[in-house]
Image (cartoon, rainbow, N blue to C red):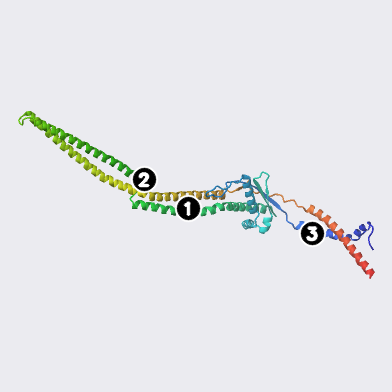
């Protein structure tokens, strides 16, 4: 027998009302039982503000690409969000607080929300009692901030360790270059090559001038001696015109002798000037030889000096980078990239439950499911009875 009237449906529902009520009762029982056994939930929240510090990277020869403040804030918030909701940090929090729950449960109870201001993040934790919510949130945020600072400081720490090793190598290279330059100076009895070359050049110029002066004086004295010889010869000739007993003879003869003595003295002085010029020439040759030797050492000295300067510049550069890396690491570890705006407080009221909404939805769905089940059972019942009559 097939149902052809719409009025048969209410009859079926009345006939199978017990099925509908059974599904309804079972559904409501499960919902009420879950609501009864589910403990109350309390949520504690804290707001943090992002501090957009300079990048922690330490560039060696080229500046790192600049990052806008908004991008830096977004990156820090993303890193903090992944850290604060990680099970690893949750496990540390549970070990520190002693709250009895699993790391996965704690990680699932954490929620984050970015504030409309753009540089603030609100972190919330839901727990079964107010004290646990406040303790877990405080510890979780502290652990997450410590992990964030450590992770942000790690690049500067790694580069700093690398630069420290390079600095030690540079200092050894500098010491080697300085030792080579010192040995060169000791082997050649030098202190300041440029100063000593200048001193030798001054000595050569001074001796050259003195030699020229001595030779010029010798020439002038020789000319004076020749002049005195001529004057003496003239006086001697004049004396010969007089008798030997004449007073005039005595005068001119005495004058000729004086001119002769003067000529001898001037020639002696000229000989002394030439001897002085020869002595100066000997000293001048020595200074010129020393100057030549010093000039031949200039190339090697410049190479050694340039090597020392290059090693010194490299050492100073690396020392500056080591200090920069240390400052950036200290900045990341001490100042950090986020700060809490106030402390987490113990929640006073539990979170509102959705038992009523769930019960209403469950009631509607259970009535619908019960009705469908009633029609299915009626259909099966009639199919079985029709089959047995046919047989």
Q: Quadrant of the C terminus?
A: bottom right
Left or right of 300, for residue 136: right
In three-dimensional space, the C-alpha distance between marks 2 and 3, rounded to whole angstroms, equals: 101 Å
Which mark identifies residue 81? none
Pick the front one: 213 or 339: 213
Q: Are marks 1 and 3 in contact (CB under 8 Å)?
A: no
Residue topped by disc 2:
194
Q: Earlier in the sequence, mark 2 or mark 3?
A: 3
Residue topped by disc 1:
167
Residue topped by disc 3:
30
> Height in image: 344 above or below 264?
below
Q: Are marks 1 and 2 in contact (CB under 8 Å)?
A: no
The image position of residue 194, as x and y in percent, is: 36, 45
Q: Earlier in the sequence, mark 1 or mark 2?
A: 1
* Residue located at (51% from left, 49% from top): 321
In three-dimensional space, the C-alpha distance between marks 1 and 2, rounded to whole angstroms, equals: 31 Å
Left or right of 379, for residue 204: left
Under tag 2, what secondary structure? Answer: helix
Q: Residue furthest bottom?
A: 391
Q: Quadrant of the N terminus?
A: bottom right
The image position of residue 295, as x and y in percent, is: 35, 47
Mark 2 Cα shell of 10 Å, populated few (<14), some (14-19), many (≥20): some
* Residue located at (86% from left, 61% from top): 373
> Height in image: 100 above or below 50?
below
In three-dimensional space, the C-alpha distance between marks 1 and 3, rounded to whole angstroms, equals: 71 Å
Q: Are marks 2 and 3 in contact (CB under 8 Å)?
A: no
Q: Earlier in the sequence, mark 1 or mark 3?
A: 3
Residue 172 placement: quadrant? bottom left
């Amino acid at each position: 027998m097939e149902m052809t009237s719409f009025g048969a449906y209410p009859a079926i529902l009345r006939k199978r009302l017990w099925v509908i009520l059974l599904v309804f009762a079972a559904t409501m029982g499960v919902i009420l039982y879950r609501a009864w056994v589910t403990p109350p939930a309390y949520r504690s929240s804290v707001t943090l503000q992002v501090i957009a510090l300079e990048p922690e990277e330490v560039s060696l020869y080229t500046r790192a690409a600049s990052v806008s403040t908004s991008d830096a804030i977004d990156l820090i918030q993303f890193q903090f969000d992944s850290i604060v909701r990680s099970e690893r940090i949750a496990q540390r929090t549970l070990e520190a607080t002693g709250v009895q729950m699993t790391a996965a449960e704690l990680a699932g109870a954490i929620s984050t929300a970015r504030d409309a201001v753009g540089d603030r993040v609100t972190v919330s934790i839901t727990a079964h009692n107010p004290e646990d919510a406040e303790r877990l949130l405080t510890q979780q945020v502290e652990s997450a901030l410590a992990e964030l600072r450590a992770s942000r400081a790690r690049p500067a720490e790694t580069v700093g360790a690398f630069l420290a090793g390079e600095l030690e190598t540079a200092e050894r290279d500098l010491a080697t270059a300085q030792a080579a330059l010192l040995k060169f100076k000791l082997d050649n009895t030098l202190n300041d090559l440029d100063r000593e070359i200048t001193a030798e050049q001054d000595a050569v110029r001074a001796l050259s001038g003195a030699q020229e002066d001595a030779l010029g004086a010798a020439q002038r004295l020789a000319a004076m001696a020749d002049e005195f010889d001529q004057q003496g010869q003239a006086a001697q000739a004049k004396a010969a015109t007089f008798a030997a007993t004449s007073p005039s003879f005595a005068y001119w003869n005495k004058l000729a002798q004086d001119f002769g003595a003067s000529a001898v003295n001037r020639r002696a002085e000229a000989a002394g000037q030439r001897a002085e010029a020869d002595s100066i020439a000997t000293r001048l040759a020595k200074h010129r030889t020393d100057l030549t030797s010093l000039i031949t050492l200039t190339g090697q000295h410049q190479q050694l000096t340039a090597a020392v300067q290059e090693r010194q510049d490299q050492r100073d550069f690396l020392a500056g980078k080591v200090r920069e890396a240390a400052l950036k690491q200290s900045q990341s570890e001490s100042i950090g990239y986020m700060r809490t705006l106030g402390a987490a407080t113990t929640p006073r009221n539990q979170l509102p439950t959705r038992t009523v909404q769930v019960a209403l939805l469950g009631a509607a769905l259970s009535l619908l499911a019960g009705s469908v089940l009633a029609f299915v059972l009626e259909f099966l019942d009639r199919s079985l009875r029709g089959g047995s009559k046919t047989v």
